[in-house]
Amino acid sequence: MAGDTPTLTRTDKAAIFLMTLGEASAAQIIKHLGPREVQKIGTAMAGLQNVSRDMIKVSVDEFVAAMQTQTSVGLGKEDYIRKVLNDALGEEKAKSMIDRILVGGSTKGLESLKWMDARSVVELIRFEHPQIIAIVLSYLDSDQAAEVLCGLPENTRSDLMMRIATMDGVQPAAMKELNDMLEIQLRGGAQGQAAGMGGLKVAANILNLVDRSVEAKISEQMGEHDPDLAGRIQDLMFTFDNLIEIDDRGIQTLLREVSTDNLVLALKGTDDNIKNKIFKNMSQRAGDMLREDLESRGPVKLSDVETAQKEIIGITRRLAEEGQINLGGAGGEAMV
């Protein structure tokens, strides 16, 4: 009924927006999304029915004028999803995702773990040999690997991180064997592939995203066992305090990506050097408003502060990987 526009989630709006762009443009955008985002948006596309003009206006009001004559997107959604995902990810990589989104099946082998929650991954691998667990953690995205690591027994974590840090790749036969083992457990049947996995940077990325208390304990244990290795991992880690080493242009780029609420939380309890670095790279008005927010915000949980800082660290690393900023000290190369 006209006017009865259903409540749309942010994912629904993103899906509608992509569907209005056309296959080629949508594919170019999807290339830059991570596995979790692609699955969420693909699932939302598959679940959309009778996309009305009102829903399009809510999702992408800047395109209202161009869509005045349309009452719906008018796309064959299954063909659209298959075409967009194949163009964006390649046929082989997209196949398991399409099966999961459209058919309701599960992705296969190692790749399937990326679509599972951390607790399920822990249950699946916790009794495997530590080297297998290390390979799995290396294969996962850093944020998911950090969650899985925190779910594993505390006395195994430092050993796993050292295995990851000293891993310089996995042979195709070993990858296939692991993949086959996971297929049996998950009742799947995908093919294994060789991959350059593990290494110091992978270990540092995972440790960057675990809780501070967990990271400190793991680092201490690694330092007792192999001080040199632990030191090299620490050199590659990027912490919130390392923001001081980013140049002004980089800080300005970062601030455009960070919400005010997260920034206020992250700055609670930090030293004046970090705060001054942030204030220096804001307009006078924005800086004054931030100071007021910091002063008016009462006591906050340390866990909330750490969560906000980790989110900003994640944004910082993404911008660095995209070449938009240079990390300078820890976590990056200095410019000369």
Image: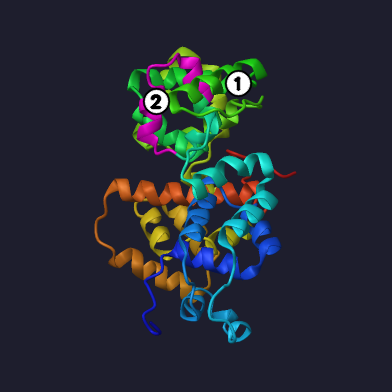
Total label count?
2
Left or right: residue 28 versus residue 221 is right
Amino acid type, label 1: Met
Residue range highlighted in magenta: 116-135
State the SS at label 2: helix
Magenta stretch holds residue 200? no
Q: Which residue position holds label 2? A: 124
Label 1: how many Cα within 10 Å (few below 14, some 14–19, many 20+):
many
| Quadrant in which the N terminus is drawn | bottom left
State the SS at label 1: helix
Viewer can see residue 24: yes
Relative vertical location of residue 252 with respect to residue 82 in this rendering, above or below: below
| Quadrant in which the C terminus is drawn | top right
Viewer can see residue 216: no
Picture disc at residue 175: 1
- The Cα atoms of the two marked residues, 2 and 1, are separated by 17 Å
Amino acid type, label 2: Leu
Q: Work out whether residue 323 or residue 160 is closer to the camera in this orientation and state it.
A: 160
- x, y percent for residue 78: 57, 57
